[in-house]
Amino acid sequence: MKVLVMCAGCFQEDGHPLNCHTAWHEVNDRGAYLTECPRGHKTVSVVQQHKFEILFELGARALLDGYPGEAITRFASSQERFFEFFIRVVAQRNQIAQAAMKQTWQDLVNSSERQYGAYLMLHLLHYGTSVSPKPEKVKPAGATGKTKDWKAFRNSVVHKGYIPSTEEAIQYGELVYDFITSQVASSMSTAGESVQTATMNLIMEAADSFRDVEGRRYNQTMAIPGVVGVLAGTEVRSFREALEQVRVMRSTMDNLVTNLEHAKGA
């Protein structure tokens, strides 16, 4: 997946997008993109979304492109990174210093089971209830003894080379989608300010990764259209409807880019 970045320096000087240098960047792990235009501007563009939001979008696109196995892997990663997001939100709500959070996270960073355990306990402390239903314990439709629950199914795909059908990928995506959207809505209603602060911390960390860039530098934030997460809102829709929205957004973006390039060449 690629993102289109507009030069903030050109826009600041000319005030019109048609006069701005644009560049495509492949989505990366750091969540920030450095663009240098022919006019000497350097723009650091930082994505506002958390990693779980980007990963889910990658999964949805993989599913639409006919890669159900890749989609399942991305959906599973999205769920795990949502656990991290929630942990950071609760830490922020309890006024835990960023440095202390980073130091403690190092003890969890290489163990998804530890992260899941931390999520379960913080969910209990934050809401006073345990996570229910636990998505990985849900039984898939038509499950066999080999895939008695979604955790076993996911592990079969990721670790045992099981080739899933498109329908199985849709069912798994629906499970993760319903879980994340409901949990994001709950987080926004009970700790909205902490969610916003955690998001701002994410943006600042990504921008700092380019702190060594010298010269004429501009900073800006950007959003990648997505169907799950903080920026996607809490509107209730089905996963299949969300998939259709991804398809429409891709088509709209393609048309926008085509029209922009045509206008520049006119």
Image (cartoon, rainbow, N blue to C red):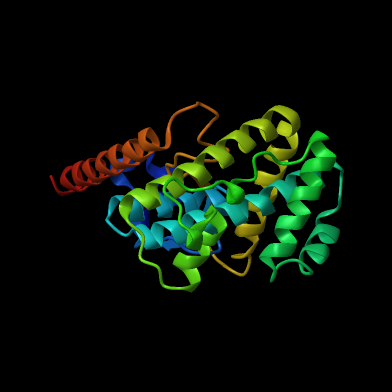
**Image side of residue 78 versus residue 112, left or right:** left
**Image side of residue 261 versus residue 78, left or right:** left
Task: Please say whether residue 140 is visible from this viewpoint.
Answer: yes
Of all residues, the one furthest to the front in this rendering is 145
Residue shown at 77% from the left, 63% from the top = 105
x and y percentages locating residue 67 in the rendered image? 31, 60
**Location of residue 131 with respect to 32 vertically, above or below:** above
**Image side of residue 25 versus residue 195, left or right:** left
For this rendering, which residue is in front, 116 or 160?
A: 160
Residue shown at 62% from the left, 65% from the top = 209
Of all residues, the one furthest to the left in this rendering is 266
Count of numbered marks: 0
Task: Please say whether residue 21 is visible from this viewpoint.
Answer: no
Residue shown at 86% from the left, 43% from the top = 94
x and y percentages locating residue 137 in the rendered image? 61, 50
Residue shown at 81% from the left, 58% from the top = 101
x and y percentages locating residue 226 in the rendered image? 44, 42
